Image: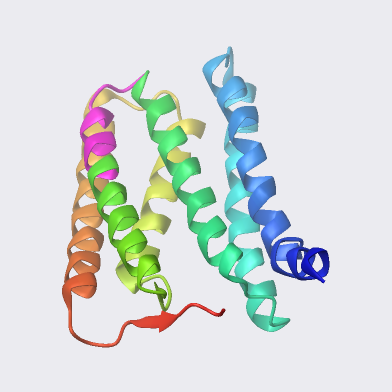
């Protein structure tokens, strides 16, 4: 009985796609950090595009086929954040201005992790990603992928991109902070 429930909770197509995204992270890192020519950067960008595509597909599959699981609700954002963090760190080796983006990213994600854990201890979970979080994720992925496939960007161009990323991160961080401290019902009970 336990094994059957375990398979139903973890071994779903959306969850396997999220796990696949996690497996793509070291592949991307090796290719990007060892890139010698434009083709290598295009390959690294293609890996990120596949990661983004599987992120979009796994959510649609989960909702359409009613394959939403509590494990998936945790795994999907972990795959997103791990990918984003890796991307920013790899790019920061080339563009030091991105250390500011890393710092805000770590603070924002640490807050969300602690607030999410606090909710989890109460048997609750956020109903879903907030719109500002989805927009921030989209902006981050698009801007970071652009930096990967256009390695000739100047430091000034990257500074502009970093400021844009920081603005969207602050907006998302603010909305999540307000939501977690709000008395409104933005949360649902975990299925037992």
Assess whether residue 144 is covered by the magenta stretch. no
Q: Quadrant of residue 10?
A: bottom right
Give the left or right position of residue 60, taking residue 111 as reference.
Answer: right
Q: Residue furthest bottom?
A: 185
Give the left or right position of residue 8, taking residue 136 as reference.
Answer: right
Q: Residue furthest front?
A: 1
What colouring method underlies this structural image? rainbow
For residue 153, say whether it is visible. yes
**Closest to the observer, 148 or 104:** 104
Please provide the residue range marked out in magenta: 94-105
**Closest to the observer, 166 or 79:** 79
Query: In the picture, which quadrant includes the N terminus?
Result: bottom right
Residue drawn at 51 percent across, 60 percent down: 74
Residue drawn at 69 percent across, 82 percent down: 66
Residue 121 percent location from the top left of the image = 37, 66
Query: In the picture, which quadrant includes the C terminus?
Result: bottom right
**Closest to the observer, 185 or 4:** 4
Give the left or right position of residue 40, taking residue 10 as reference.
Answer: left
Instruction: Give the main secondary structure, helix, strand or loop, of the magenta stretch.
Output: helix
For residue 46, say whether it is visible. no
Residue 63 percent location from the top left of the image = 63, 80
Residue drawn at 66 percent across, 65 percent down: 57
Q: Quadrant of residue 179?
A: bottom left
Give the left or right position of residue 133, taking residue 14 as reference.
Answer: left
Residue 124 percent location from the top left of the image = 40, 75
The image shows a total of numbered marks equal to 0
């Amino acid at each position: 009985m336990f094994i059957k429930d375990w398979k139903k909770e973890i071994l779903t197509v959306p969850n396997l796609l999220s796990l696949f995204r996690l497996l793509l992270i070291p592949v991307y890192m090796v290719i990007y950090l060892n890139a010698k020519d434009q083709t290598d950067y295009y390959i690294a960008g293609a890996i990120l595009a596949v990661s983004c595509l599987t992120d979009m597909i796994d959510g649609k599959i989960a909702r359409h086929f009613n394959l939403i699981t509590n494990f998936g609700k945790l795994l999907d954002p972990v795959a997103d954040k791990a990918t984003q963090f890796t991307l920013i760190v790899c790019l920061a080796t080339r563009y030091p201005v991105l250390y500011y983006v890393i710092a805000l990213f770590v603070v924002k994600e640490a807050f969300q992790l602690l607030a999410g854990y606090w909710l989890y201890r109460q048997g609750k979970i956020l109903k879903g990603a907030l719109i500002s979080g989805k927009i921030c994720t989209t902006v981050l992925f698009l801007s970071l992928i652009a930096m990967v496939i256009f390695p000739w960007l100047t430091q000034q161009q990257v500074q502009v991109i970093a400021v844009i990323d920081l603005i969207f991160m602050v907006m998302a961080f603010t909305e999540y902070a307000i939501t977690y401290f709000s008395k409104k019902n933005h949360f649902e009970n975990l299925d037992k």
